[in-house]
Structures are given as structure tokens and as C-alpha cells.
């Protein structure tokens, strides 16, 4: 039983360690889940913000690119018209001048052009609107050069804007890819952490249930051990008295058996006929009764209930077996009682040995605990 109690204590200790480990795992998993959830939310917000910025940038670039493309187209047509006029292939009539003034007026105020260039073009356009205006080929050529310079600047600005748009798009795609990839990894780890949390929670619940059962078993074993120790202490006390009493009982029964053997020993060599049975019974009856009286006296003297009961049983046997070999039957009763006492002695000795073993293990365990406390 002490061994079972030790096993129960070891199981309780093991389950308590399992509970502590499960609680630690739950704390770690919950902390990691919180960290990952926060990081994932931050990355999603960052990607959303980056997407909004990218969308706005793309929209602004598209608007500016369209405007520059229209400016370049207008300048290209104006230059072509002026070149034809300068070479004599086309005369600038009122209609052509009106179109030229209208188209250039819409683009020359752009931020891409310098104030000086804008002023020169405006002066040229104002002059063309006068009916008496006359511009030499050199003047037209000068304006053509100004417009070509303005177109080169517009094309340069458009090229730079397109390059910036390409870089901005590339950078956004890199950020998006990085955040998306990290999001996949973090979501996978988040799912794994949630599974680990569920596993730890299940282990904790199982361990707590097992611990409750183990503690109940431990309490039961402890109570049983305590009861056994009390019983064993009483057994040890009773055993000493029982051994002494049984010695006296066996000694008394041996004396009674000896009396019977002495009474029957001399008669065993005699031969009896059927006609002598009644004489044998009359002669033997007092001798048997003396054995019964002897057993009763021994029972009172030894204060032995078993010998007293044996005397009563022997008396009943004598009464029930008149005219028969009652000595043999009484002798059988005595031998049976002797064997019963011997069997009881053997059983008590086994119980005493068991108690001695349990008490020794208990004392040894107690000494180990005291040694652990001292150290």
C-alpha cells in the first residue's frame, strides 16, 4: 500500500508539472497570437495606405501626362504650321492665325515654360492678331525655335514624370509583395499558434481532471494506509497476547489428547465381542466424561471460548454416540481444534508479517522525507 501511495504521489507531481507546462504553453501561445494579430493588422493598414497613395499618384500622373501630351501635340502642330509659313508653302491667313493663337494660348501658361519664353510667344500671337501685322521670316524662325525649346522641355518633363511613375509603381509592387508574403507567413504562424493554444488548453483540462482523480485516489490510499497502520499496531499488540494464549490452549489440548491416548492405549490390545459392547460402554463412559470435564476446566482456566465450545461439542458427541467409540470421536474433535489453532496461528503470522513490512516501508519513507527536509 505504501508503494501505491508513492506511485500516487509521483503521479500527482507529474500531473502538476504537466499543468504548469500547459499553462506556460497557453501563456506563450496567447502572447504570440496577440503579437501576430497586431503585426498582421499593422501590415494590412500599411498596405491599404500604400495602395491609396499609389492610386492617387497614378491618377495625378495620368492627368499630368495627358496634359503634357496635349501640349506637345499642340506645339508640334504649331511648329509645323510656322515652318510651312516660313518656307513659303503656306500663308498665314486670318483663320489659320486664329487657330494658332487659340491652341498656343491654351498651353503657353504651363509651369514647364519659362516666363521669358511665354512672353515672347504671347507677343508674337498678339502681333498676328493685328490686321496690319507683318512678321519676317527671321521673326517666324525665332518663334519656331522658342516653341521647339518649349516642346523639348515638355517632352523632358513628361519623360521624367513617366520615369518617376515607373519607379513609384515598382516601389509599390515591392512593398506590396513584401507585405503580402509576410502576411502569408504570419497568418500561417497565427493558425499554428491557435492550434497550439487549443492543444495546450486540451492538455490542461485533461491534466486537471486526471489530477483531481489522482488526488482522490491518493487521499483514499492515505486513509487506507493510516487505517492499516492502526490495524497493524493493534494486530501487533493482539498478536503477542494471541501467541501466548494459543500456546496455552495447544498445551492444554495436547494434555487432553494425551489423556485420551493413555485411556485408549491399553484397551487397544483387547478384543471385544458383541456381547461385551455394553460393558465397554459402561466402563469407557466415565473416562470420556472426565476428558470433557478436563476440557471445561481448561477452558475456564485459559479463559478460552474455543476450548469451552470444544468441551460442549465433545459432550454433545458423547451423548449422540452412546455405545460407540466415543474416545476416537472426541480425540478427532481435539485434533481438529489443534489443527484449527495452528491454521489461525499461521494466518495471524502472515498478517503480522504483512503489517511489519508495511510499517517498515512507512518508517523508511518517513526517514527519507525527514532527511530531505534536513538537507
Image (cartoon, rainbow, N blue to C red):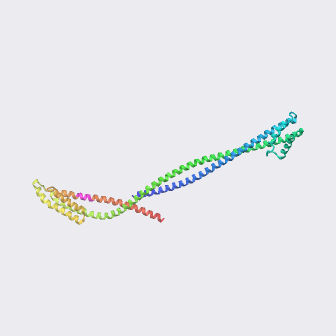
Tell me where residue 223 appears, x and y as whole percent. 39, 60
- Above-or-below relation of 187 to 135: below
Residue 171 at least partly seen:
no
Residue 218 is left or right of residue 341, and the answer is right
* Nearest the eye: 149 or 108: 108
Tell me where residue 203 appears, x and y as whole percent. 49, 52
- Above-or-below relation of 313 to 154: below
Residue 338 is left or right of residue 13, and the answer is left
Quarter of the view holding residue 157: top right
Tell me where residue 326 appears, x and y as whole percent. 17, 57
Please identify the quadrant where the N terminus is shown.
bottom left
Residue at x 64%, y 49% (from the top left corner): 45
Residue 179 is left or right of residue 235, and the answer is right
Residue extending farthest to the left is 275
- Above-or-below relation of 116 to 302: above
For the stretch drawn in magenta, the main secondary structure is: helix
* Nearest the eye: 12 or 110: 110
* Nearest the eye: 368 or 269: 368
Quarter of the view holding residue 335: bottom left
Total marks in image: 0
Residue 72 at least partly seen:
yes
Residue extending farthest to the front is 131
In reply to whether residue 122 is colored magenta, the answer given is no
Please provide the residue range marked out in magenta.
Answer: 335-341
Tell me where residue 375 appears, x and y as whole percent. 48, 64
Amino acid at each position: 500500500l505504501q508503494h501505491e501511495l508513492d506511485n500516487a504521489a509521483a503521479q500527482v507531481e507529474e500531473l502538476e508539472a504537466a499543468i504548469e507546462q500547459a499553462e506556460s504553453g497557453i501563456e506563450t501561445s496567447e502572447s504570440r497570437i496577440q503579437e501576430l494579430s497586431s503585426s498582421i493588422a499593422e501590415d494590412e493598414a500599411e498596405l491599404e495606405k500604400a495602395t491609396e497613395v499609389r492610386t492617387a499618384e497614378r491618377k495625378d500622373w495620368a492627368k499630368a501626362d495627358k496634359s503634357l501630351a496635349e501640349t506637345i501635340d499642340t506645339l508640334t502642330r504649331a511648329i509645323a504650321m510656322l515652318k510651312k509659313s516660313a518656307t513659303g508653302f503656306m500663308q498665314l491667313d486670318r483663320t489659320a492665325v486664329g487657330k494658332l493663337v487659340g491652341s498656343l494660348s491654351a498651353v503657353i501658361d504651363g509651369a514647364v515654360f519659362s516666363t521669358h519664353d511665354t512672353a515672347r510667344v504671347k507677343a508674337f500671337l498678339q502681333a498676328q492678331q493685328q490686321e496690319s501685322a507683318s512678321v519676317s521670316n527671321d521673326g517666324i524662325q525665332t518663334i519656331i525655335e522658342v516653341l521647339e525649346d518649349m516642346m523639348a522641355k515638355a517632352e523632358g518633363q513628361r519623360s521624367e514624370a513617366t520615369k518617376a511613375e515607373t519607379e513609384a509603381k515598382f516601389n509599390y509592387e515591392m512593398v506590396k509583395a513584401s507585405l503580402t508574403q509576410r502576411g502569408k507567413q504570419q497568418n500561417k504562424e497565427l493558425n499554428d499558434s491557435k492550434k497550439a493554444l487549443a492543444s495546450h488548453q486540451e492538455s490542461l483540462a485533461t491534466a486537471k481532471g486526471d489530477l483531481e482523480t489522482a488526488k482522490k485516489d491518493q487521499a483514499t490510499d492515505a486513509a487506507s494506509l493510516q487505517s492499516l497502520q492502526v490495524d497493524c499496531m493493534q494486530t501487533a499488540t493482539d498478536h503477542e497476547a494471541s501467541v501466548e494464549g494459543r500456546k496455552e490452549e495447544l498445551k492444554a489440548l495436547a494434555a487432553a489428547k494425551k489423556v485420551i491416548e493413555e485411556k485408549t492405549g491399553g484397551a487397544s490390545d483387547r478384543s471385544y465381542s458383541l456381547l461385551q459392547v455394553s460393558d465397554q460402554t459402561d466402563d469407557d463412559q466415565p473416562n470420556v466424561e472426565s476428558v470433557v470435564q478436563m476440557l471445561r476446566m481448561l477452558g475456564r482456566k485459559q479463559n478460552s471460548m474455543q476450548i469451552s465450545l470444544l468441551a460442549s461439542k465433545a459432550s454433545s458427541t458423547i451423548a449422540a454416540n452412546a455405545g460407540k467409540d466415543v474416545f476416537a470421536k472426541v480425540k478427532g474433535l481435539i485434533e481438529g481444534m489443534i489443527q484449527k489453532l495452528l491454521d489461525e496461528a499461521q494466518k495471524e503470522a502472515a498478517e503480522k508479517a504483512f503489517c511489519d513490512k508495511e510499517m517498515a516501508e512507512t518508517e523508511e519513507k518517513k526517514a527519507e522525507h525527514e532527511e530531505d527536509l534536513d538537507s
